[in-house]
Amino acid sequence: MIDTRSAPFGRSETQGMSPKIIATSGPLRGTQFELEDAEISVGRAPASHVCVPDVSVSREHCLIKEDAEDGWTVVDRDSANGTFVNDRHVKEHRLRDGDQIAVGQTTLVIFLHPEPEPKASVTLDDADVLADQTIKLREADALYLKPAKADLPATSGVGRDLSTLLNVSRVISSIRSSTQIQRQLVKLILQAVPAERCTLVRLDHGRLDLESAVTCDKRPPSDEPSSLSRRTLERVLQDGSGIVCNDVQTGDMKSSATLVRARVSSVLCVPITAAEEKLGIIYLDTRDPAVRFGEHHLQLLVAIGGIAGVSLQNARHVETLEREAERLRADIAIEHNMVGESPPIRKVYEFVAKTAPNDSTVLLEGESGTGKELVARAIHQNGPRASRPFVAINCAVLSDQLMESDLFGHERGAFTGAITQKRGKLELADKGTLFLDEVAELAPLVQGKLLRVLQEGEFERLGGTRSIKVDIRLVAATNKSLSAAVEDGSFRLDLFYRINVVALTLPSLRQRGEDLRLLATYFLQKCGKRCGRRILGISPEAQSLLDGYGWPGNVRELENAIERAVVMGSTEWLLPEDLPEALVEASPSVSGQRLKYQDGVREAKKQLVLTAVTDADGNITRAAKSLGLHPNYLHQLIRNLGLKQQLMH
């Protein structure tokens, strides 16, 4: 016996009638969305109706909304990369049937008047439909599956069958979805065979998968599910032979009340096979006693079963690969505000994807300005605590006592000025994520109390005696070496082990050379929008300065430099004179690559500094005073202008 899924599942006859959009490319390819609400949001945000896991798609990218004339309009929501309809950039566009909406790498096709889908509500009847008028045909004996050895008669019927097989092969070979292959097949078969109903049922690990069954019926719609003969299906699968049975009402059908009530008179059933593997069943029937299925119908359907088997098998392999690819894409398709596509930053994305789903403590190391808080927020946003608080605290900006009070809270009267009770950041972060930036700056006393929180999940407020339970995930960050801090005794070894569970060193901007221009453009658009300035881009001369600079302050310094240029600039292009002087001073002069004005300014500064230091007999403090500068700034200017070696001689 073949196990079947007994409940009649499947799509209803009318489900496909409402407007819908289908993704034909990108990470959602093959996914269908019904336009059931008046507004359908599209974006990267998880709350979107159509959530697209693609970093090139904005969190709130566009809206597809119903208009006053019962039509649909797409409206761009100031997305970073724009919304396109039929390859045209649009802000608002009234949609027509079949329009293609492109957001990032995803194309959505809108169907305003879709055709009714083949229905798929199927049950099995235990009656046997075999009667006296029964014909069987094995695949090995199928005429059309071995035309090289067969002597095909030159008749119009054979010509029609060959034309049908060619059409079936052409249509389904271009389809990559097994469900779409089923839908097309049942329609094509009903065009070629005088049946009233055609049902295609796939096998799933040797069992009939009624949930995936698709039926196309020429008869008026009915609430009754399609009823198939279980014994006939089992016999076809067991023997591997196709069966035609006519005059079934006069045979053993009297035991089947369902089929008798349906007045089925003829049945045709063939297996779907590929490389001797059975993939499903094609089942046809009719109630018209004047219609009789013959051997030529059986020959045609057995051949279609063989052709369909290869296409279904290929589609199944493609779908398996696509699911695996989607799973791998999902590993890095994370919610974050980071920008970049270079290999170092992709490793950061992969790290976030792997660490976000669990509660392990994370240690982020790296130079100042590399985006450690952005990574911490991404870990929080993509984890199970995303709906809970994310609380950040900088351990370097407060004194030891204020840090202890800010982190653990205090009771009233705990110290002078503590006139009310205060909840600390730990309590505020309960059930969420606590981000400790510059964790190496924690005082030894605070380190000990934090260790207890990580070990026991409890603490006392400053001046209190009652233990408070908390459930937090800790993400710590530092621009120093914690292992070095442990060696010099400024950081506890036991706390280091508690914090250093999963660690990542963030790449500096110097290591992300491929991302520099992408980041610069991103900050240019961001600052231009905030400042209300229309800027077309960065001039080649200014870009040369950006590329040649070492960026000791990393991404933060780049953002500040671009913001300064946007504020100080006066043209539609970002020019060298708009950038901070440090960039110009640190970049060697290259003829033809920068404006002569900048070269002149640089040379004038060199002469002023050299003259002042020479007149002061090498005394930097006196030279700075004569120039009206702070000595620290003069030291920096000497380094940026490359005068250190020259002054040493």
Image (cartoon, rainbow, N blue to C red):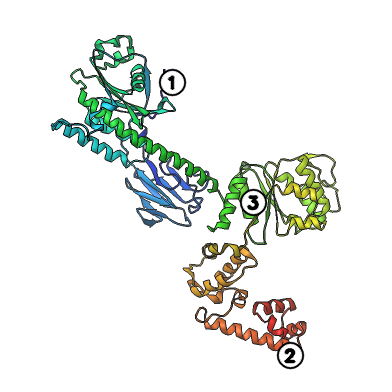
Q: Position of residue 284 (x, y in %)?
A: 28, 24
Disc on the earlier residue, 2 or 1 = 1
Q: Is residue 260 left or right of residue 20?
A: left
Q: Quadrant of the N terminus?
A: top left
Q: Is residue 60 above or below residue 292?
A: below
Residue 128 percent across, percent down from the top left: 32, 14
N-terminal-most mark, 1 or 3: 1
Which one is in front in this view, the residue at disc 2 or the one at disc 1?
1
Whether 49 is drawn above or below 373: the answer is above
Helix or strand or loop: what does disc 2 sit on? helix
Q: Provide the secondary structure element on which disc 1 rests.
A: loop
Q: Residue at x 57, y 85 (%)?
A: 600
Query: Mark 3 belongs to which amino acid?
Result: Ala
Q: Nearer the viewer, residue 175 or 629?
A: 175
Q: Secondary structure at mark 3?
A: helix
Give the CA distance from mark 1 to mark 3. 50 Å
Q: Where is residue 52 drawn, in percent x and y?
A: 48, 47
Residue occupied by mark 3: 376
Location of residue 290 by image quarter: top left
User: Which residue is tagged 1?
Assistant: 3
| Numbered tag placed on residue 227 in the rendering | none
In the depicted structure, whether residue 618 falls above or below residue 311: below
- Pointer 2 residue: 615
**Which residue shows up at 36% across the image and 55% down it?**
87
Alpha-carbon neighbours of circle 3 within 10 Å: few (<14), some, or many (≥20)?
A: many
Q: Quadrant of residue 458?
A: top right
Nearer to us: label 1 or label 3: 1
Badge 2 vs badge 3, beta-carbon distance below 8 Å = no
Name which of mark 2 and mark 3 comes first in the sequence. 3
Q: Amino acid at mark 2?
A: Asp
